[in-house]
């Protein structure tokens, strides 16, 4: 339970899986769409640092243009998780919380997993299993997941990519023999039109799918035809209720009073809870599109360039004179400018694309990056501020996540923004750069650390 002193409660279920790529997102989308069309007030959440899945959630339910909230048991304080759940479910009858990777995967082998969220909230786990290449062995997989951790039990299973009626019979027989108390809630057929396209950082963003509405209809129809939604709803209703304290906790300090936030296909990776937290602290947020060559508003006292896919649009960004000129003018007059990951790269001197062509960027930080030879940098980060910024005081510690394929060709001279370590406590060293009122790094910040 979180903050049990208050009697406010949210009913929910957790859509977990045995591994990434098992079908969690499609199942979550289908459930959200189906229940919404049945008149159920439904709300989404996403476990972990992923930006893309929440965009699909938000598109389906139409509740929040910025995306659904993330909850993260390693990167967030319990109070912040409580706030996200409270905000997501304040007008909902049911929260559908999509897990991350496999059920027990997280920041380390013992922390940050979907199972941790299940234990923290009391919500029942619906396990999605891709059975496209197995029969009776699927029951062994479910049994293993059901016994791996004493406090983590599977409330129901959905078998995905079922091949035939004979396949269904085999799966039911194996489950009845091995796990008679774990109900099969669904048998979803193996259909190509229920696949979402991917790229190097995950699924292609919802805003880029031209057929997203048709896909959502198919997903909802699949849920209606192949999932026992009544049984699923009963499981959620009978789960132990989560309680919250009714007091909002904001993840990060606002960068300024009026914050210009870049928002388009190149800069889509901002956490909705961060933005809402800034608003709750009195900040005004105005979005602008660098890809449309729009300069940040001149009356903004802070500019936030979040991550995204600038490497896919580097030609347009390099030729966006109004945008680049607006950034440089803002820097000269003392406007706070902060960039994360893709935004950090754009604040640098140049970016080399996959073909080896160098494109001039804003030139506000002494940074050069390249995608000519991609290298994966992935993992949770515990970072300590090395410089005084609007994010916090020197030695203030925060938690975040790094995920990119860019290589650094040059970084500095200049002061570092963070001193970083991994989730396992291993030292990573200095990260990011600070140049007066301009600063950034490859880390996506999620929350302040509890003092």
Image (cartoon, rainbow, N blue to C red):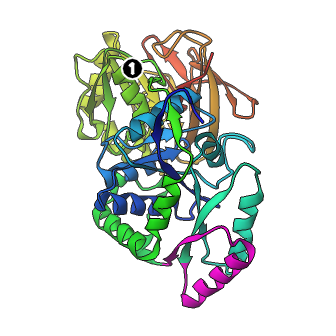
What secondary structure is found at the residue carrying circle 1? strand
- Position of 212 with respect to 71 (left or right) is left
Please name whichever residue, 29 or 383, is drawn nearer the observer in this view of the structure: 29
Please name whichever residue, 450 or 263, is drawn nearer the observer in this view of the structure: 450
Residue shown at the point (33%, 23%) measured from the top left: 279
Q: Is residue 314 above or below residue 255?
A: below
**Residue 258 occupies quadrant:** top left
Please name whichever residue, 72 or 317, is drawn nearer the observer in this view of the structure: 72
Residue shown at the point (56%, 62%) measured from the top left: 21
Residue highlighted by disc 1: 337
Q: Is residue 255 above or below residue 193?
A: above
- Position of 114 with respect to 215 (left or right) is right
Which image quadrant: the C terminus? top right
Residue 81 locus on image (x, y percent):
53, 33
Magenta segment boundaries in residue numbering: 162-190
Which image quadrant: the N terminus? top right
Please name whichever residue, 217 or 208, is drawn nearer the observer in this view of the structure: 217
Residue 77 locus on image (x, y percent):
58, 28
Residue shown at the point (45%, 58%) measured from the top left: 28
Does 270 lie within the magenta span?
Answer: no
- Position of 229 with respect to 128 (left or right) is left
Residue 295 locus on image (x, y percent):
24, 28
- The reply to whether residue 348 is in sight is no
């Amino acid at each position: 339970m979180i903050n049990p002193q208050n009697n406010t409660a949210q009913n929910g279920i957790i859509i977990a899986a045995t591994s990434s790529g098992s079908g969690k997102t499609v199942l979550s989308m289908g459930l959200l769409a189906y229940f919404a069309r049945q008149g159920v007030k439904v709300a989404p959440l996403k476990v972990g640092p992923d930006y893309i899945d929440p965009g699909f959630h938000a598109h389906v339910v139409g509740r929040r243009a910025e995306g659904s909230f993330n909850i993260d048991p390693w990167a967030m304080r319990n109070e912040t998780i409580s706030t996200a759940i409270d905000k997501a479910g304040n007008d909902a009858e049911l929260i559908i919380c999509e897990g991350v990777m496999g059920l027990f995967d997280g920041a380390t082998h013992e922390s940050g997993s979907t199972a941790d969220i299940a234990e923290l909230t009391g919500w029942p786990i619906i396990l999605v299993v891709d059975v496209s290449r197995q029969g009776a062995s699927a029951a062994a997989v479910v049994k293993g997941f059901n016994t791996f951790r004493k406090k983590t039990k599977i409330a129901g299973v959905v078998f995905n990519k079922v091949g035939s009626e004979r396949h269904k019979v085999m799966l039911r027989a194996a489950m009845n023999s091995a796990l008679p108390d774990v109900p099969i809630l669904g048998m979803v057929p193996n259909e190509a039109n229920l696949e979402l396209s991917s790229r190097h950082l995950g699924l292609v963003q919802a805003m880029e799918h031209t057929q997203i509405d048709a896909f959502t209809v198919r997903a909802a129809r699949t849920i209606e035809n192949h999932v026992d939604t009544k049984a699923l709803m009963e499981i959620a209703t009978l789960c132990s209720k989560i309680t919250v304290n009714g007091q909002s906790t904001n993840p990060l300090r606002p960068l300024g009073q009026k914050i210009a936030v870049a928002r388009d296909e190149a800069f889509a990776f901002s956490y909705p809870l961060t933005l809402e937290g800034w608003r709750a602290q009195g900040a005004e947020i105005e979005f602008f599109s660098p890809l449309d060559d729009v300069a940040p508003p001149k009356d903004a006292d802070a500019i936030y360039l979040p991550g995204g896919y600038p490497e896919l649009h580097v030609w347009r960004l390099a030729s966006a004179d109004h945008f680049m000129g607006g950034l440089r003018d803002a820097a000269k007059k003392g406007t706070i400018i902060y960039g994360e990951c893709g935004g950090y790269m754009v604040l640098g001197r140049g970016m080399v694309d996959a073909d080896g062509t160098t494109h001039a960027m804003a030139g506000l930080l002494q940074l050069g990056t390249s995608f000519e030879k991609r290298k994966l940098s992935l993992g949770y980060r515990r970072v300590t501020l090395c410089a005084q910024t609007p994010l916090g005081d020197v030695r203030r510690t925060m938690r975040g996540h790094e995920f990119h394929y860019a290589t650094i060709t040059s970084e500095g001279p200049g002061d570092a923004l963070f001193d970083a370590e991994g989730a396992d406590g291993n030292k990573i060293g200095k990260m990011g750069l600070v140049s007066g009122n301009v600063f950034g790094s490859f880390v996506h910040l999620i929350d302040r650390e509890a003092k």
